[in-house]
Image: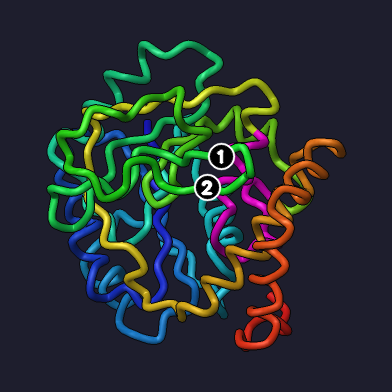
Amino acid sequence: MLSIVILTYNSQKHIEACLDSVFRQKTADIEVVVVDNASSDKTKEIIKGHYPRVKLIENPKNFGASKARNQGIECSSAEWILSLDSDVVLGDGFIEKFEAAWQLLTDDIGMIQPQVLMEDGKTIYSQGIHLTALRRFHDLNQGKTKDFTGGSSEKIIGPCSAAAFYRRSMLDKLKEKTGYFDERFFFLVEDVDLAWRAKRAGWKVLFDSQVVCTHVGNSSGTDKKLRQYLCFRNRYWMIAKNEDFWERGRVYALSMPYELARGLSLAVFNKYFWRKF
């Protein structure tokens, strides 16, 4: 069995295409959990009216992506969990190809990164999260054509949680007081943090270019300034959690001029800098 955990927040434009692509897959052995973060549009009505197989969790307010993913994981039961954003559409044979891959995996592989394309189906959105020496991160090969062959498991630290497979036994061993995904992050960078913790614990990630889906990206219309602030803050939290003392000092020292300027700019011009999330 595969558990599929989907996050929704004002997702009425995309949730039908997402769920239709899930239930079109040639496998009956799935469970689907949707966690809704208090959508104010018709997302919940669409799910209740058209998808009786979906287990729907309705949050009273927007708890953020980290907590919502954790809720979905807690309510699921399979050994492998597929994390999806609501604007992801699975390609033909997505789950079949995953099942063929996981049966050949070694026990130390706890994460699988599929080939995630942009909405046009021609351009790469993510081949996994690449973490640099200065602890900056980006989606590997984003913007390149889908035929680009530069993706590899060795170049990434973990999968992009918009479409990511996680082994439950790995998640159980990594779980903190703040959840599988660190709920203090609210959203953004939580998947990088989880992947880093997994790597430190000896787990590996596999990139599989044959397992393909498309992703719109930021379809909920999150404020750009909020994304900027959370990326800045959560990156520092992630480094503080995962890096040893001396390496943390090196990273801070080398990036200090840029980070000070960026932090000052956010403090002055970004309204979210002084808010609590």
* CB atoms of marks 1 and 2 within 8 Å: yes
**Rendered residue at 34%/45% (across/down):** 126
User: In this view of the protein, can residue 243 be seen by the observer?
Assistant: yes
Between 15 and 236, the residue placed more toward the observer is 236
For disc 1, the marked residue is 132
The relative height of residue 152 versus residue 50 in the rendered view (above or below) is above
Among numbered discs 1 and 2, the one appearing first in the sequence = 1
Tell me which amino acid carries mark 2. Answer: Phe
- Which of the labelled discs sits on residue 111, or is there none? none
Q: Position of residue 244 (x, y in %)?
A: 82, 36
To which quarter of the image does residue 220 belong?
bottom left
**Rendered residue at 37%/57% (across/down):** 85
Q: CA distance from mark 1 to mark 2?
A: 6 Å
**Rendered residue at 70%/82% (across/down):** 267
Between 49 and 157, the residue placed more toward the observer is 157
Give, as a single range, the part of the protein colored magenta.
Answer: 179-197
Total number of numbered discs in the rendering = 2
**Rendered residue at 45%/32% (across/down):** 80
For disc 2, the marked residue is 137
Tell me which amino acid carries mark 1. Answer: Thr
* Quadrant position of the N terminus in the picture: top left
- Describe the colour scheme in one phrase: rainbow
